[in-house]
Image (spheres, rainbow, N blue to C red):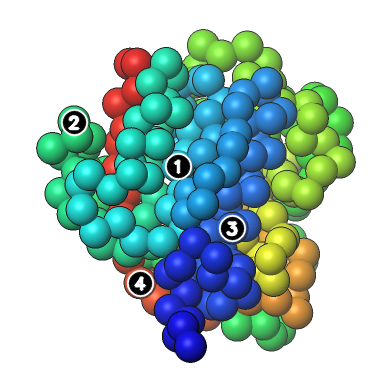
Amino acid sequence: MTLETGRRDDAPVADSIMHAFLHNQADVGDLVAAAVGGRHTRVPGLALADTGGPVVYTNQAILFRPVLTADDPLLAEVDRFFAGSPSAMLLSAWPTPDLSVRGWQLIGHPMFVVRAPGPHEAGPPDGPSIVPAHTADQLALAERVVIDGYPLPEAAGLPRHGLFGVDLLGGPIRIRVSFVDGEPAGVASGHVGHGVDNLCLAATLPAARHRGAWKSLVWARVDDAPELPAVAFTSDDSRPGFIRLGFLPITRFTLWLVPGAG
């Protein structure tokens, strides 16, 4: 009898919330890449998505199992896939060996946070308003807020919908813009799948920070599937905000920059 570890290539997606998140996030990568004419594929133990653009966070390799050595064959798959592409990001839910020997660069160790299903506080009646991106113009506005708010200066020269392709409209990734005093303040996206509600992107314009835009976007996405756990991986800057809203810090992920073709 083979004991389940949750780390085999054939591990059930629902083995753990973390494993479900990895598959959800891989689907996000596929959808974002496909919407701008990019590439995506899966091999056992690994998901790969490449928009072809300059934003490293939208060119993702996601491991479904740990890698224990710097010469693991999955890492060679990553190098092959991104060989003719701009830089990419490898996401591992587990500690990795030192991959700088491959010419890769450590980005950091964001925290994976989880909130159990359940009610939450209501926002103030005069708080930020939330507008889903249902049209090409609304999607273009969301794209601009992400570029300016994150910020993503490397994306500033992209054509309209070079980051958020119009094929995302009406799809499973829900993109919203928050407004404070009638002005765009923040943007966030969420994706429900594999039994978790993935809060997969958020950015707030500098002038709108600490005015409720980020918090309102968290609750809007939680409400997409209040019966499911809400999950995210977050920087240490945003982590305190998630903790205040009832998210629990679970584990730190590992992110590596994969150079690609430059």
Give the distance between the C-alpha atoms of the residues marked 2 and 4, in whole angstroms: 26 Å
Query: Which amino acid lies under the numbered mark 2 shown in the image of this protein?
Result: Gly
Q: Is residue 236 visible?
A: no
- Nearer-N-terminus badge (1/4): 1
Residue 205, above or below 161: below
In the picture of the structure, the residue carrying the numbered disc 2 is 103
Residue 139, horizontal then vertical, whole percent: 74, 31
Would residue 192 appear left or right of 6 to someone viewing this image? right
Q: Nearer the viewer, mark 3 or mark 4?
A: 3
Sequence-wise, the earlier of marks 2 and 1 is 1
Disc 1 marks which residue? 61
Task: Describe the element under mark 2 as helix, strand or loop.
Answer: loop
Do the residues under discs 1 and 4 have CB atoms within 8 angstroms? no
Residue found at x 33% / y 36%: 76
Of mark 2 and mark 4, the one earlier in the sequence is: 2
Q: Which residue is mark 4?
A: 251
Q: Secondary structure at mark 1?
A: strand
Which residue is at 40% across, 32% downward?
A: 88
